[in-house]
Amino acid sequence: MHDRQTSDVIPDDPNDARTSKTRRKAHMHALQEIGERLTALDGERLAQIVLPEMLRNAIVEAGRIRKHGAFRRQLQYIGKLMRTVDTAPIEAKLAEWSGQSREAAAHHHHLEQLRSQLLADDHALGALAGR
């Protein structure tokens, strides 16, 4: 019988019994935070994200809840459902919408460079228009 060696273990795997309780809780809070961001989306944007039906229904239901305690419990439930979902595509889409993606950052940086050129040089507008 082959014993699992430490090098075979993913250190931050929240499902591994050897992962500390603190790390498991941090992972759950991160999932709840993503879930909370999903509950803030309008229906059109939420429809653009591929989600299991049960998770989508829980997110829509959270939007209807007005009491703080009930909303927190619903977020915990959403976090539990998200344990089985690959959150990378969801986080990428949320980052894109919030302007945190690399492309958005590069575009913003380029616009800032153009702005600086326009403020620094009176002839920059003519050069930019001539492009």
Image (cartoon, rainbow, N blue to C red):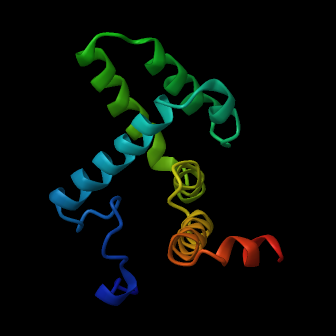
Image quadrant assignment for residue 114:
bottom right
Which quarter of the rendering shows the N terminus?
bottom left
Left or right of 26 on screen, residue 110: right
Q: How far across and down, in percent of the image, does residue 91 sit?
A: 52, 54
Image quadrant assignment for residue 103:
bottom right
Left or right of 5 on screen, residue 96: right
Closer to the camera in the image, 76 or 39:
39
Q: Is residue 35 above or below residue 99?
A: above
Q: Is residue 72 above or below residue 51?
A: above
Q: How far across and down, in percent of the image, does residue 70 sit?
A: 29, 15
Q: Residue furthest right?
A: 130
Q: Residue at x 58, y 55 (%)?
A: 96
Q: How far across and down, in percent of the image, does residue 31 sit?
A: 38, 47
Q: Residue at x 47, y 43 (%)?
A: 82
Which quarter of the rendering shows the C terminus?
bottom right
The mark tally for this picture is 0
Closer to the camera in the image, 85 or 29:
29
Left or right of 103 on screen, residue 87: left
Q: Is residue 80 above or below residue 115?
A: above
Q: Residue at x 51, y 73 (%)?
A: 116
Q: How far across and down, in percent of the image, does residue 39 sit?
A: 47, 29
Closer to the camera in the image, 104 or 81:
104
